[in-house]
Image (tube, rainbow, N blue to C red):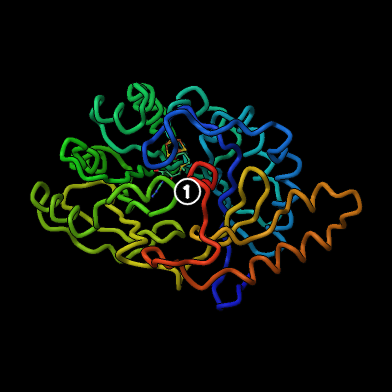
Amino acid sequence: MIDGYGRTIDYIRISVTDRCNLRCVYCMPEQGIPPVSHQEILRFDEICRLAGIFGELGIRKIKLTGGEPLVRKNLPVLVKLLKETPGIEKVTLTTNGVLLAEQMRALADAGIDGINLSLDTLDPDIFAAITRRRELERVKEGFLAALHYPGIPLKINCVPMGPEEQKIEELAELARKYPVHVRFIEMMPVGLGKEFRGVSEAEILEQLRRRFGREETFRGRLGNGPAHYYAFSGFQGKIGFISAMTHKFCGECNRVRLTSRGFLKTCLQYETGTDLRELLRSPEIRQEDLRKAVEETIRNKPAEHRFGAETVEHREEKIMSQIGG
Ligand code: SAM
Ligand code: SF4
């Protein structure tokens, strides 16, 4: 559907849990977050009912996220149900990869259309420092398991944080050795991300040029998100950037978010949106009323983020694992 600023909204990120088996320093506190009871989280049938409305309103692509979506029991079942929803053309997943090797086959059988693997470094000690867990080996197994399905596009997402030991060139190298795109995401000042500086696209490109030579701008389109891509000579995949800070893309934003507790959220930076769970669970609610609520929320999507501004009304106070990234 079209929002109040003329943008086509055809993509939703649906979070299926607040829980995670890692504790990335920019996303979750070391002690985790107070566990949300199962009752507070949307059930699969509730997610599917809302997905039916999203499909009717023109949402075509769903990305499952979290917390870590693969810790939610029976996730492949949800993938299959969403794939059967009229209007929904693609269902993809963003994961930290720890449980990917054991679930890849079931996800493929369920019809998953793409996987984004979040991986910030290939160095075991730095990985443990960033995620506070020694799980790099399992993530690598997940990566290799996903490569066994060439029909399911795989992308690596890295949030660079500055230290040289993160060795982002090694990550970029994955796009040379394997048919995967590697993307660098600028740290956003949301939740714990406010405490980190992040690294700009310009700095990373400079670092990559020193190792791989001059890049060429890739003019084709890959996926329907805000990333832009470069081609390096001899690489099978492309190198992408999602630079919300230095290359603001609000004018082309095509997405909204549904939190695991059923809050429809229209921009990362603000807490504004609608509690769809409350509506869903009220006894008299009609499909038509739910539809209207979703439509109106999307129509009121804010024009842009104002990261960096001193005072922002309705600023989001949740941390990223409660939003879904
Ligand atoms: N656990 C899954 C994963 O890591 O892919 C899904 C949820 S996670 C919140 C989704 C994405 O958000 C990850 O790629 C993560 O690196 C990114 N992320 C978390 N906090 C961020 C921040 N402050 N700025 C930019 N990206 C962030
Ligand atoms: Fe977990 Fe993903 Fe957040 Fe890391 S980025 S703590 S893996 S939810």
Q: Residue at x 34, y 51 (%)?
A: 187
The image quadrant where one finds the N terminus is bottom right
Q: Nearer the viewer, residue 208 or 282?
A: 282
- Image-quadrant location for residue 64: top right
Which residue is the extreme one toward the right? Answer: 284
Q: Measured from the top left, where is residue 145 in percent x and y?
A: 41, 27
Q: Quadrant of residue 294?
A: bottom right
11 to the left or right of 143 = right
Q: In the picture provided, is 130 more to the left or to the right than 145? A: left
Q: Secondary structure at mark 1?
A: loop
Any atom of ligand 1 within 8 Å of the CB at mark 1? Answer: yes
> Picture coordinates of residue 310 (x, y %)?
39, 66
Residue found at x 33% / y 59%: 243
Residue toward you, 206 or 33: 33
Q: Position of residue 223 (x, y in %)?
A: 44, 56
The residue at which mark 1 appears reads as 325
Given residues 168 and 276, the one toward you in this image is 276
| Image position of 238 (left or right of 207) | right
- Residue reaching furthest to the front: 311
Tell me: residue 298, above or below residue 230. Answer: below
Residue 317 appears at what percent x and percent y? Answer: 52, 52
Q: How many marks?
A: 1
Mark 1 is on which residue type? Gly
Looking at the image, residue 300 sits to the left or right of residue 120; the answer is: right
